[in-house]
Image: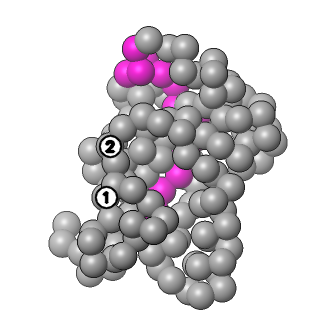
Amino acid sequence: MPKELISLIPTINKAKENPNLNEAIIYAHIFGVIGDWFISGLSEDGKIAFGYQHVEAEEEWEMSSWFTNSKEWGEFSIDNMQNLVNNEFLKEKDIRFLIVRDMAWKPKKFADAVINQATLNYPGSVI
């Protein structure tokens, strides 16, 4: 993520202080064929994020070594995601590891974000 965006996002501890997570501001959205990540807080170095994870990898995709299916708030490693993109998608051309930041995303309340529908569908999946 660019430094300008990182500077707008509160620290993880500050983001976790919000007692009503539906009111939490989502500053960035990352998505791939296995799910979406909505970021409301970052570590100071930008390597760890706090936010909502909506990950639904099919068992056949054999992704459990890298991602856990979840629909909950928590911390996740931006650094690990970038390493997977660099090593598995860019080098190996494995579409399962295509993970990108939504460049058109504007900060909004979590309650206003569409989280129940995958942003990107795996090729050949039924819509």
State the image quarter where residue 19 is shown. Answer: top left
Q: Quadrant of residue 33?
A: bottom left
Is 12 included in the stretch rendered in magenta?
no
Write the residue at 27% across / 69% down: 58
Q: Residue at x 51, y 83 (%)?
A: 94
| Highlighted magenta segment, given as a residue range | 20-33
Q: Residue at x 31, y 58 (%)?
A: 56
How packed is label 1: few (under 14 Cα within 10 Å), some, or many (20 or more)? Answer: some
How many neighbours does mark 2 have within 10 angstroms: few (below 14), some (14-19), or many (20 or more)?
some
Examine the structure image and report whether residue 30 is included in the region drawn in magenta.
yes
From the image, tell me which residue sits under label 2. Answer: 71
In the image as oriented, which residue stretches furthest toward the bottom? Answer: 92
Q: Is residue 87 above or below residue 64?
A: below
**Front-most of 70 and 52?**
70
Which secondary structure, mark 2? Answer: strand
For the C terminus, which image quadrant? bottom left
- Give amino acid for label 2: Lys
Q: Is residue 107 visible?
A: no
- Whole-angstrom CA distance, mark 2 to mark 1, is 8 Å
- In x, y percent, where is residue 119? 38, 56
Counting every numbered tag in the picture gives 2
> What x and y, as percent, mark residue 103?
60, 51
Q: Provide residue 47's location: percent of width, then percent of height.
A: 71, 47
Of residues 27 and 65, which is closer to you in this image?
65
Q: Is residue 90 visible?
A: yes
Q: Which mark is residue 56?
A: 1
Question: For this view, does 44 lie left or right of residue 118?
Answer: right
The mark nearer the N terminus, 2 or 1, is: 1
x and y, in percent, of residue 48 in the image: 65, 43
Horizontal side of residue 117 vs 66, given as left or right: left
Marks 2,1: beta carbons within 8 A:
yes
Callout 1: helix, strand or loop? loop
